[in-house]
Amino acid sequence: MATVINMPRLSDTMEEGTVASWLKKVGDKVAEGDILAEIETDKATMEFESFYEGTLLHVGVSEGETAPVDQLLCVIGNEGEDISGILAGGGDTAAEATEEATDSGDDEGSADAAEVPEGVEVITMPRLSDTMEEGTVASWLKKVGDKVAEGDILAEIETDKATMEFESFYEGTLLHVGVQEGETAPVESLLAIIGPEGTDVSALKGGAPTKASKSPEEPKAKQEESKETAPKETSTASSANDGRIFASPLAKKIASDKGIDLGSVTGTGENGRIIKKDVENFKSTPKVEASAPAAATKANVPAPQLYTPVGEEVFEETKNSQMRKAIAKSLGKSKFTAPHYYLSIEVDMDNAIASRKQINAIPDTKVSFNDLVVKASAMALRKHPQINTQWQDDVTRFAKHISIGVAVAVDDGLVVPVLPFTDQMTLTQIGANVRNLAGKAKSKKLTPGEMSGSTFTVSNLGMFGITSFTSIINQPNSAILSVGAIVQKPVVKNGEIVVGNTMTLNLACDHRTVDGATGAAFLQTLKTYLENPVTMLA
């Protein structure tokens, strides 16, 4: 008899858990006491052992995914046991799910499962990140009628954090596509149906409606009007044989931003697929526009004629990416719920410049000024734990660990990869980890686990020449540090005006958890570390 195992509550404050890794896979034998998975809670990553024995029949939460407490985690039972009734129950408790699966028989209780023809698999929009609520199909790599093997990439799906490949866990024929390219649908809505060729799946197509760009019921006259006024969209088709064009999602986005017709671009990727560099290297023939005729001047009139330009007001709309919508949602919530205030301090960077030069003279060593700031922040947080907190309605949570998020700009917006236990890292370890995570961010290879768990955030625009700015707090953090550029200017040292190198730091604090004096003390400690880098090497 199959047993449903739900996401356990492994700490008193745990509301959801992330599966860091599965130590068993579907089909493996499980003995009582075996470690099933490592689960990351709000406090630690803990081993979760099985209290049952049997075969692992189903995994409900994949590695890197997050699920609330009591949601279906996995199913253990007898090898080959039919658990379709349990899965149709959507993660009931073990007793309820098992009772329903064994007692329903041919009763009406199993009608939903019976409606799915044998061998047919209904695939829903997956939750590919811990904060994902909806996904956009960037491109389908299979079309209706194509054969699908287990492990084949079905589609590229744009989440709120990255564009990710979605592979099939089933084999058969792609019978139906529920979300077209460019359309958006909520998690768990119908994405596709796979099954034996020729199977009638018309009864299964009533999935959740998608956010299509135009409703089928929209009057024809309205559609014609939209065609005349809306900007022409770039083609997103994919094969030369059927008039479509293979192109990666990033290539499509760049082409759309630059107004490039993908039909004019030659692809150099696999099977002629258009990739990023093809669009970036594409050179179109410039169009020569006739200039408006010069206005005639009236004879014998000393005053100059007023020139009135003639033109057309044009707007172009681009669809907001999942990342931009997520940024808008999270930062809007932060700005309008957390009472922000800002503190600013100027730091003498002469010693830091000299110390960095000496450190980087060591072979195979590279430390940036941002690495110095991150290290100094971690050490200052240890002395000022009130900054390393999270506000909740009834309690303030003090994080005993220090994990600093480093804001990284990418094409679609901003991501914040996290350095776990930053205070335990050396400067060179911080530098190596930041460069690795930044590279993953720019290539959209960051995992959800690498972007969660920060207790403090550093945002640096100094490399863009920005001398001072303020940031919005990355909740649930209580503060964020904005780092400006190092500038040369006259400063007073020992009663004399000399040329010095200074850097401005701005600290945004949540007044619910951090008072002004506390934030000021933190900045003073941070300044001391940066102006005396040798103290960070001890």
Image (cartoon, rainbow, N blue to C red):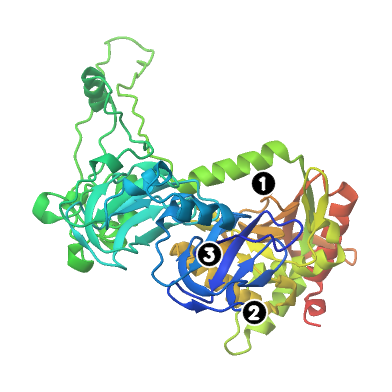
In this orientation, does residue 447 appear? no
Indicate the secondary structure of the residue bearing disc 3. loop
Answer whether labels 3 and 2 touch (C-beta < 8 Å). Answer: no
Q: Residues within 10 Å of mark 3 (few under 14, many from 20)?
A: many
Q: Residue at x 40, y 50 (%)?
A: 125
Label 1 sits on residue: 472
Q: Give the Cα distance between marks 3 and 2.
A: 24 Å
Determine whether, in the image, residue 117 is placed left or right of residue 79. left
- Secondary structure under badge 1? loop
Callout 2: helix, strand or loop? helix
Q: Amino acid at mark 1?
A: Ile
The disc at residue 64 is 3
The x, y position of residue 110, in whole percent, is 40, 47
At label 1, counting other C-alpha atoms closer than 10 Å, the crowd grade (few under 14, some 14-19, many 20 or more) is: many
Q: Nearer the viewer, residue 23 or 437?
A: 23
Q: Earlier in the sequence, mark 1 or mark 3?
A: 3
- What residue would you read off at disc 2? 429
